């Protein structure tokens, strides 16, 4: 028997040796398999690899040593392929990070023979290509998946499965060993997601990620059969309807993310039965109703909880004083969910919090005793959009606090003098839209901040020189306060600045040089008392996207070096004392001559105020980059409107009003195909209004008043909707609709003898006049046709009167007979 076993072992060894005889030795004694090497080289041939991630894949080398691969030390089979993008894709990154992501993306077709790597148990192709340029070839053939029967981990994140129909799920259902499935942002929609499955084979699944797809159905019922699930991530879809009660079957669930969907109705109490839950994210849905203790009764392990609703009416967080939660949270996020008086007691039981967001909850105070308890470990504090009053509630040290956001409340009093010492590691500070008074304490400049937002308060005093200590600052927004004095000199300006907003204060003097700020993107200094000429260094700030200097006392000519700012989106020099002509080189600003594009994103809280359509408009951080605007109004500019400006086809707002411009409107003004606002009022422009103006299909705000235009107002297309006569008033030689002044020839026959086209009122008047003439003529002809004959012919006159005498006698007899009959009835 022993010899027989020895013989079998020897045969097995020889079989393995013969199979791998042409391969290379592995540390464990096995050899690299030639067939699998050939599969991998062909796989590489089908891909585009700009990052060189597959550069180590070459024939003759040990495939088990190639980047992204691992082999079984005993058999030599490839068991792991990890080709994920080394630069993770994050939606809210700025443009530079996204560029790194794109440049490291693999692209091409995944060939069907990848299924020949039948021993693979780990396959990760996540982020292999950007979501906006997916190769649909992948979606046409997924049957290779069915041959990977040993697969335990599969990640096809951002691979386009949009054309695969329901077959993707069919093949995945053939993988009984699968433990983790990641299909984030794969372009799958509801037509590809069966709500029912006859048989669910991959019941060993512990992680299911189908986030950021296009599912707009209810949550499939078969998910409730995956009773081994520990993580379910469905965020970023369009799932609607309530959460199914069958979720009670998911007893092992630890992580549930249903955020950013369209789930509605009451939040079911069944979630309170999932006793293993550690993370529960229900934010950004359409919940209604009330949250109570029943939603949390068994969640003893809960560590992170988030809920919010996008309904106009908020949720109600209704807890009682005598029932404290059974958990200790580290993260809490409650947004647009009104809390009652008992919530303060509920909150004070959470003493281990590190991340707190309580926004739009109706809070009127922050419990200072609770704040003291969490001060040593808390990293994020967000209390935006509440009704919190009084002074800032900080009296102890917060050594780990990274982000503090108290925007849009009713905080008053001064910022504490020792604020910087209390928060030594703060990076992001938001105190905008409150009622803070006093000066900015110098201790703030000791904090290594990245962003500071003090917008729209009542702060006063000068802006201190100490801001040079912010060596890593990106954003400084102190707009809409009562600050005064000069901006500290160029030696004190942090070179890291990307956004500086000091508009609507009382700053004065000259602008210091920002030439050392190589990343400066937005400079807003409007609504102050700055004076002097625009400095030449502005032309070297090629990173500028927004330059807002309106409502100051700048003078001199608009410098031609502004045309070097090829990336500029917003140029606002209105309400100053600039003179001279409009530079013809504005067409060098190429960003205004191309399709709208975004600009680098530094923080979600950033807001941009732009004057457009005759009023101030607020733009958020993600759509401000789409605005293209030039406003040179209320200056002393003269000369003509340069033709070159009409090449800025992406321009949305052009305001040249209240200057001394003369000449004609450029005839090709219609080239500005994106224009929404055009204001040329209060100048000395003359000539006819170009017909091409009617081709501006997006034009919604037009003002040409108070000039010397003449001739007929163009008509047609979008101009038909602009019916306010004030658009054209103050031009005495203009005529036509919508003015009441008629153009010459409107009431006269044309040269062909035809009547000119007139309005309906004229047509009605002509018809009435014709009717009156016809009636009058008919009466005259009829009267004299009868009476004239009777006067002339005596015999006819006797016969005519005899006829009427006979009729009279007959009528009298008829009346007498009728009266007699009536009397007989009585």
Image (tube, helix red, strand yellow):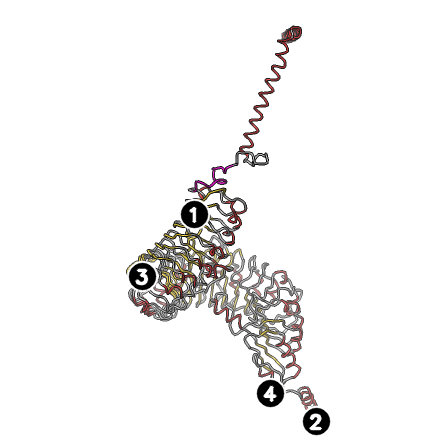
Q: Residue at x 43, y 61 (%)?
A: 563
**Residue 743 sits inside the magenta stretch:** yes
Q: Mark number for residue 3? A: 2
Q: Are marks 1 and 2 in contact (CB under 8 Å)?
A: no
Q: Secondary structure at mark 4?
A: loop
- Circle 3 residues within 10 Å: few <14, some 14–19, many ≥20: some
Q: Are marks 1 and 4 in contact (CB under 8 Å)?
A: no
Q: Mark number for residue 366? A: none
Magenta-tinted stretch: 731-744
Q: Residue at x 66, y 8 (%)?
A: 796
- Circle 4 residues within 10 Å: few <14, some 14–19, many ≥20: some
Quadrant in the picture for residue 525: bottom left
Answer left or right for 234 relative to 542.
right
Q: Mark number for residue 26? A: 4
Q: Position of residue 166 (x, y in %)?
A: 65, 64
Reading the image, the residue beneath label 1 is 685
Q: Mark number for residue 510? A: 3
Mark found first going from the N terminus, 1 or 4: 4
């Amino acid at each position: 028997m022993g010899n027989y076993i020895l013989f079998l072992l020897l045969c097995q060894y020889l079989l393995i040796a013969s199979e791998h005889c042409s391969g290379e030795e592995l540390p464990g004694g096995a050899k690299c398999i030639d067939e699998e090497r050939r599969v991998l080289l062909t796989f590489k041939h089908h891909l585009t690899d700009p990052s060189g991630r597959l550069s180590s894949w070459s024939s003759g080398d040990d495939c088990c040593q190639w980047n992204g691969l691992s082999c079984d030390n005993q058999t030599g089979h490839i068991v792991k392929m990890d080709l994920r993008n080394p630069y993770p894709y994050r939606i809210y990154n700025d443009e530079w990070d996204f560029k790194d992501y794109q440049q490291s993306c693999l692209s091409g077709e995944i060939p069907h023979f990848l299924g020949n790597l039948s021993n693979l148990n780990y396959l990760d192709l996540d982020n292999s290509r950007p979501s906006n340029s997916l190769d649909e070839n992948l979606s046409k053939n997924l049957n290779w998946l069915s041959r990977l029967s040993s697969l335990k981990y599969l990640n096809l994140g951002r691979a386009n499965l949009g054309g695969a129909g329901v077959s993707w799920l069919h093949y995945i259902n053939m993988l009984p060993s699968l433990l983790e499935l990641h299909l984030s942002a794969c372009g799958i929609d509801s037509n590809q997601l069966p709500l029912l499955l006859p048989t669910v084979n991959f019941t060993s699944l512990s992680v299911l990620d189908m986030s950021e797809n296009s599912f707009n159905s209810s949550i499939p019922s078969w998910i409730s059969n995956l009773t081994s699930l520990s993580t379910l991530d469905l965020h970023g879809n369009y799932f609607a309807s309530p959460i199914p009660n069958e979720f009670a079957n998911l007893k092992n669930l630890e992580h549930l993310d249903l955020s950013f969907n369209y789930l509605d109705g009451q939040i079911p109490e069944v979630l309170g039965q999932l006793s293993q839950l550690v993370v529960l994210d229900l934010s950004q849905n359409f919940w209604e109703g009330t949250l109570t203790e029943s939603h949390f009764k068994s969640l003893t392990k809960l560590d992170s909880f988030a809920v919010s609703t996008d309904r106009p009416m908020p949720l109600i967080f209704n807890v009682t004083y005598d029932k404290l939660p059974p958990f200790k949270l580290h993260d809490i996020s409650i947004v647009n969910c009104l809390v009652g008086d008992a919530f303060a007691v509920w909150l004070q039981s959470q003493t281990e919090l590190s991340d707190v967001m309580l926004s739009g909850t109706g809070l009127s105070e922050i419990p200072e005793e609770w704040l003291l308890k969490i001060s040593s470990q808390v990293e994020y504090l967000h209390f935006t959009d509440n009704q919190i009053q009084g002074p800032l509630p900080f009296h102890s040290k917060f050594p780990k606090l990274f982000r503090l956001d108290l925007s849009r409340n009713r905080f008053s009093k001064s910022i504490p003098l020792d604020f910087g010492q209390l928060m030594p590691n703060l990076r992001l500070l938001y105190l905008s839209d409150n009622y803070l008074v006093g000066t900015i304490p110098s201790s703030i400049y000791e904090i290594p901040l990245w962003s500071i937002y003090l917008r729209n308060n009542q702060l006063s005093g000068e802006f201190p020189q100490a801001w040079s200590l912010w060596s890593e600052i990106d954003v400084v927004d102190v707009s809409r306060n009562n600050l005064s004095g000069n901006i500290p000199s160029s030696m004190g300006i942090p070179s890291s600045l990307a956004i500086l907003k000091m508009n609507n204060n009382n700053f004065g003097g000259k602008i210091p040089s920002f030439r050392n700020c190589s990343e400066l993107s937005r400079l807003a200094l409007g609504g102050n008392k700055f004076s002097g000429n625009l400095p030449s260094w502005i032309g070297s700030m090629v990173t500028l996207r927004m330059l807002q200097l309106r409502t100051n006392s700048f003078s001199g000519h608009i410098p031609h070096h502004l045309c070097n700012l090829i990336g500029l989106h917003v140029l606002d020099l209105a309400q100053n004392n600039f003179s001279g002509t409009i530079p013809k080189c504005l067409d060098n600003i190429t960003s205004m001559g191309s399709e709208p594009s975004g600009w680098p994103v530094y923080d979600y809280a950033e807001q941009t105020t732009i004057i457009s359509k005759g009023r101030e408009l607020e733009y958020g951080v993600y759509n401000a980059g789409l605005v293209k605007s030039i406003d040179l109004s209320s200056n002393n500019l003269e000369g003509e409107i340069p033709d070159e400006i009409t090449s800025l086809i992406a321009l949305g707002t052009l305001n040249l009003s209240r200057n001394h411009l003369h000449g004609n409107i450029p005839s090709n003004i219609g080239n500005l195909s994106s224009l929404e606002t055009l204001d040329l009022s209060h100048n000395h422009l003359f000539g006819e209004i170009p017909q091409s103006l009617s081709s501006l299909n997006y034009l919604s705000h037009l003002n040409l008043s108070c000039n010397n235009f003449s001739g007929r107002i163009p008509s047609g297309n979008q101009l038909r909707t602009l019916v306010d006569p004030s658009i054209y008033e103050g031009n005495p030689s203009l005529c036509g609709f919508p003015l009441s002044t008629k153009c010459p020839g409107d009431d006269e026959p044309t040269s062909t003898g035809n009547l000119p086209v007139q309005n309906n009122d004229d047509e009605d008047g002509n018809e009435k006049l014709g009717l009156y003439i016809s009636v009058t003529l008919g009466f005259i002809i009829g009267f004299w046709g009868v009476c004239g004959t009777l006067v002339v012919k005596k015999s006819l006159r006797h016969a005519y009167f005899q006829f009427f005498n006979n009729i009279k006698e007959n009528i009298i007899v008829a009346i007498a007979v009728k009266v007699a009959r009536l009397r007989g009835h009585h």
